[in-house]
Amino acid sequence: MTIEDTIHAYYTAYNACDEAALAGLLHPDVVLRSAMGEQRGREAYLATYRYMFGAFVDRMTPEAIRVEGDVAVVAIHDSLTARADIADFMGRPVAQDEEIVLRLEGRYRVVDGRIVAIEIAPAG
């Protein structure tokens, strides 16, 4: 599986809420860095994933993928729709059914078909 194949499989599993497939693409010691802080390890990543899907309908669409060595740089269109009122999400309240659209850049380090590091930040 190429790095690009791994990234496509990741987004397919993420958007399908297929936690088992997603877990299979992550290295046990994966590190996730995002606006929600840093999570270390597959279980910590999956806890963040469960939180996001509990709070939102979250659809991440990779708009462009560029591979640089063992890193895939991905332009992401992220659509988050709140399942219920949220008092504080990234410093602000979100009403039920409110959609938040984010333009993000993801950097995914892939080794032997597994993602070992993810950095998600605002695009730009």
Image (spheres, rainbow, N blue to C red):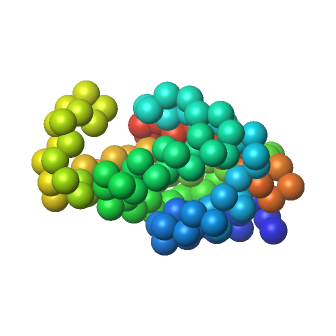
Q: Number of labelled discs?
A: 0
Q: Position of residue 114 (x, y in %)?
A: 77, 54
Is residue 21 at all visible to an observer of this figure? yes
Residue lying furthest left: 95
Q: Position of residue 37 (x, y in %)?
A: 49, 28
Left/right placement of residue 93 relative to residue 29 reads left
Left/right placement of residue 103 relative to residue 106 reads left
Q: Residue drawn 23% across and 58% down? A: 83
Residue lying furthest right: 112
Left/right placement of residue 25 relative to residue 88 reads right
Q: Residue drawn 44% across and 44% down? A: 104
Q: Nearer the viewer, residue 79 or 27?
A: 27
Quadrant the C terminus occupies: top left
Q: Residue drawn 46% across and 52% down? A: 50
Q: Position of residue 54 (x, y in %)?
A: 36, 55
Quadrant the N terminus occupies: bottom right
Is residue 80 at all visible to an observer of this figure? no
Looking at the picture, does residue 95 appear above or below residue 16?
A: above
Q: Residue drawn 28% across and 36% down? A: 89
Looking at the picture, does residue 70 appear above or below residue 65?
A: above
- Quadrant of the image occupied by residue 123: top left
Q: Position of residue 58 (x, y in %)?
A: 37, 58
Left/right placement of residue 93 relative to residue 16 reads left
